[in-house]
C-alpha cells in the first residue's frame, strides 16, 4: 500500500467542545496538528470499512484540510468518502447526507459563526451515524485516543479533484463528489409547501436573505430564487469566500447589522433572514421587527402543523436551558412535553432519535427539527415563509398574536468576550458559591424561588452532564443564567442570559433592555461581573 506512517507524537490533544475542536487556523495548520487530531478521531471511532461524509463551510484551509483528511481516510481503511463539491457542505446538509446515505459518520470543517481566514478560526467536528454531533462519550474517547497518537497514516497519492462531480478511486477508497445543494433542496421541498410560498412570492411578497459570504449562499440561491421565485439578488453576499469577505458570519443584530438596519428602515422587504458560516443558525426579521430566537422557536412550534412536514403535529419540543421559556407555554397549550437540555445540539439528538421531540431550539439563533440532527438555518427561514404563506399574516402580526395568546417573554443575552480565564472563573465561582443562600432572598424587587448549577440526565440513555450553567429563577418566572462559552478561541467568554415573562399587553412594547434591567442588576449583585472584570457593558447584546 502506498501509505506512509508519519511519526508526529506525542500529540497533546485538546478535548473537543460542544461543537468539535475549534482553534485559530494557524494552530490547525501547525505541522501535523490537523492530521494528529483526525488520526485520534479515526482511532477512537474506528473507521475501517466505514462510509464517511465530508464537507465544510468554505473557509480558508477547508479545501486543503479536506484533501488531507481524504488521504488519511484512505490510509485508515475507509471504504467511501462522500464529499460536497469544492469541499462545501452546510452543517445541516452534511447531517442530511449522513442519514440519506446511511453513512457511519461525517467530518464537518467549520468554526461555525467564528470569523475565518488565515488569522481567523478553523474547526473540525465529528458527527455520528444519526447525523448529529458526537455525544460526550465519543468526544471523550477522541480526547483519550489523542494521548496515544504517535503519528498518522496517510496515502501517498494526491487527493482527487474536488470540483468534479462523480466517483474516483483513492488508494482503494471511493471518493464520491456530490452537488452540495441538490439532496438538501429536495428534503426542503418535502417538508414545506413550496407551491404556497411560490404563490405568495409571485403575489408581490419580497424578501432578503444575507448569506454573509458563507456556505448558505448556493443553497439560498437555489431554493429561494430558483425554486421559489424570489427576485434575483434577493440573496445577498451569496458567494462563499475563504475569509467570508472579512465578515463575521454570525447572524445577529450586531454582526448582521446591514440586514438588521434594512429591515427597520422604510425600504424593508416583507421578510429578512441571515445565516451563519456553516448554515445552521438563523436570524429572522419582518418589516420593522426583529424576532428574538427564543420567540422564533415558540412561534414556529405554535404553527408547525401548517407545514406539510409537521401536519401530524409535534411530539414534543426541546430547548436548551438558557433559551427562554416561551416555548414551554406553547408545549403546554399543545399538550406535549417540553424538554430542557444543556447548551449544544448534541443533547437534542437522543430526544429526536427516540421521538420525544420533533422541534428544538436554542437562544443562540438555532432552530431545527427531526428532519436532520443539526440546527438548520434555511429550514427555519422556509418554515417562517410557509407559515406566512398559509396564514396570510406577516412576521409582525404573527409575533404580536403569539404574545397576546401566550404573553411576551422578554429575553436578552449579554456576552462578555475575551475575558481572562481567571476573571471569568472567579465570576462563575462567586455566583456558584452564593447559590445555596439565594432561595428566599429578595433581590432587586424579586424573590428568588430556586437557584442551581444545572445538571442534566438524558432521559433516553441516562448519561449525566453536570456544570451546565448557573441558574437563578424568581417567583414571577423571571430567570438569569450565567455560563461560560465552550466555543471561543480567545480567553474566556461569559454569557449572561436574562428573562422576564410578562402577561400585560400594555407592556409588550417596552424595550427589552429596560424591561430586563432589574434582572441584570440582580445578576450583578449576585456575581459581581462588572465589579470583578471592570467591564461596564457587554460586548454583544442579542
Ligand atoms: C454557542 C451557543 C450554543 C451553540 C454553540 C454552537 O456555544 O451559545 O447555543 O450550540 O455555540 O453553535 P457557547 O458554548 O459558545 O455558548 V454553532 O452555530 O457552532 O454551530
Ligand atoms: Co453554526
Image (cartoon, grey):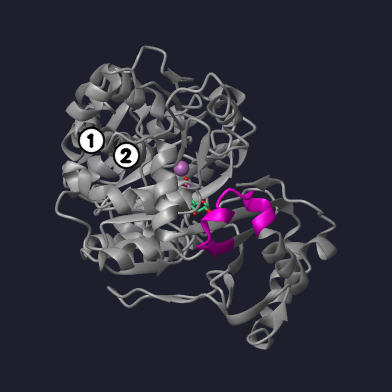
Residue 433 position, x and y percent, is 70, 82
- Examine the image and state in which quarter residue 1 appears: top left
| In the image, residue 354 above or below residue 50 | below
Task: Give neighbour class at mark 1: few <14, some 14-19, many 20+ (Cα, 10 Å).
Answer: some
Residue 202 position, x and y percent, is 26, 17
Q: CA distance from mark 1 to mark 2?
A: 7 Å
* Residue ID at (65%, 59%): 516
| In the image, residue 235 above or below residue 97 | above
Q: Which residues are magenta?
A: 499-515
Left or right, 244 with respect to 384, comes to: right
Does the magenta-highlighted stretch encompass residue 194?
no
Does the magenta-highlighted stretch encompass residue 506?
yes
Label of residue 246 in the image: none
- Examine the image and state in which quarter residue 275 appears: top left
* Residue ID at (60%, 30%): 257
| The residue at label 2 has a CB less than 8 Å from ligand 2 | no
Left or right, 228 with respect to 254, comes to: left
* Residue ID at (20%, 36%): 187
Residue 530 position, x and y percent, is 81, 61
Task: Give neighbour class at mark 2: few <14, some 14-19, many 20+ (Cα, 10 Å).
Answer: many
| The residue at label 1 has a CB less than 8 Å from ligand 2 | no
* Labelled pair 1, 2 in contact (Cβ < 8 Å): yes
Camera-side residue: 485 or 454? 454
* Residue ID at (26%, 63%): 334
Label of residue 188 in the image: 1
Mark 2 highlights which residue?
379
Residue 75 position, x and y percent, is 31, 41
- Residue 122, can we see it? yes
- Residue 138, can we see it? no
Q: Secondary structure at mark 1?
A: helix
Amino acid at each position: 500500500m502506498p501509505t506512509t506512517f508519519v511519526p508526529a507524537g506525542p500529540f497533546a490533544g485538546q478535548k473537543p467542545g460542544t461543537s468539535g475542536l475549534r482553534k485559530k487556523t494557524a494552530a490547525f495548520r501547525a505541522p501535523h496538528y490537523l492530521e494528529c487530531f483526525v488520526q485520534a478521531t479515526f482511532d477512537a471511532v474506528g473507521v475501517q470499512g466505514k462510509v464517511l461524509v465530508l464537507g465544510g463551510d468554505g473557509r480558508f484551509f477547508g479545501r486543503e484540510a479536506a484533501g488531507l483528511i481524504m488521504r488519511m481516510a484512505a490510509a485508515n481503511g475507509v471504504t467511501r468518502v462522500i464529499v460536497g463539491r469544492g469541499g462545501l457542505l452546510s452543517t445541516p446538509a452534511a447531517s442530511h447526507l449522513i442519514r440519506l446515505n446511511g453513512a457511519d459518520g461525517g467530518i464537518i470543517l467549520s468554526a461555525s459563526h467564528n470569523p475565518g481566514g488565515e488569522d481567523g478560526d478553523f474547526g473540525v467536528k465529528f458527527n455520528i451515524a444519526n447525523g448529529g454531533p458526537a455525544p460526550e462519550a465519543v468526544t471523550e474517547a477522541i480526547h483519550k485516543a489523542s494521548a496515544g497518537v504517535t503519528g498518522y497514516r496517510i496515502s501517498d497519492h494526491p487527493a482527487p479533484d474536488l470540483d468534479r462531480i462523480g466517483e474516483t478511486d483513492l488508494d482503494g477508497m471511493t471518493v464520491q463528489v456530490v452537488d452540495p445543494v441538490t439532496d438538501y433542496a429536495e428534503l426542503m421541498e418535502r417538508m414545506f409547501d413550496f407551491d404556497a410560498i411560490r404563490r405568495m412570492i409571485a403575489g408581490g411578497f419580497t424578501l432578503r436573505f444575507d448569506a454573509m459570504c458563507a456556505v448558505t449562499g448556493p443553497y439560498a440561491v437555489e431554493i429561494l430564487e430558483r425554486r421559489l421565485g424570489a427576485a434575483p439578488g434577493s440573496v445577498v453576499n451569496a458567494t462563499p469566500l475563504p475569509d467570508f469577505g472579512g465578515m463575521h458570519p454570525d447572524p445577529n443584530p450586531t454582526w448582521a447589522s446591514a440586514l438588521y438596519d434594512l429591515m427597520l428602515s422604510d425600504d424593508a422587504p416583507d421578510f429578512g433572514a441571515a445565516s451563519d458560516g456553516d448554515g445552521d443558525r438563523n436570524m429572522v426579521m419582518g418589516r420593522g421587527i426583529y424576532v428574538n430566537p427564543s420567540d422564533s422557536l415558540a412561534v414556529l412550534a405554535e404553527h408547525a402543523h401548517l407545514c406539510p412536514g409537521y401536519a401530524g403535529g409535534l411530539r414534543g419540543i426541546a430547548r436548551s436551558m438558557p433559551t427562554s421559556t416561551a416555548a414551554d407555554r406553547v408545549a403546554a397549550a399543545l399538550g406535549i412535553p417540553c424538554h430542557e437540555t444543556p447548551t449544544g445540539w448534541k443533547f437534542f439528538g437522543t430526544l429526536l432519535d427516540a421521538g420525544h421531540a420533533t422541534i428544538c431550539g436554542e437562544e443562540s439563533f438555532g432552530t431545527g427539527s427531526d428532519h436532520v440532527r443539526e440546527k438548520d438555518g434555511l429550514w427555519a427561514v422556509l418554515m417562517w415563509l410557509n407559515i406566512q404563506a398559509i396564514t396570510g399574516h406577516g412576521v409582525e402580526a404573527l409575533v404580536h398574536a403569539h404574545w397576546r395568546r401566550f404573553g411576551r417573554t422578554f429575553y436578552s443575552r449579554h456576552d462578555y468576550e475575551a475575558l481572562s480565564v481567571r476573571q471569568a472563573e472567579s465570576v462563575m465561582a462567586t455566583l456558584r458559591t452564593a447559590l445555596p443562600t439565594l432561595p428566599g432572598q429578595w433581590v432587586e424587587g424579586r424573590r428568588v424561588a430556586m437557584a442551581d448549577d444545572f445538571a442534566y440526565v438524558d432521559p433516553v440513555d441516562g448519561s449525566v452532564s453536570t456544570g451546565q450553567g448557573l441558574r437563578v429563577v424568581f417567583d414571577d418566572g423571571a430567570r438569569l443564567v450565567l455560563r461560560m462559552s465552550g466555543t471561543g478561541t480567545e480567553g474566556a467568554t461569559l454569557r449572561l442570559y436574562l428573562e422576564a415573562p410578562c402577561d400585560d399587553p400594555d407592556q409588550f412594547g417596552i424595550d427589552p433592555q429596560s424591561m430586563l434591567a432589574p434582572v441584570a442588576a440582580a445578576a450583578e449583585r449576585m456575581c459581581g461581573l462588572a465589579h470583578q472584570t471592570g467591564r461596564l457593558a457587554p460586548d454583544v447584546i442579542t
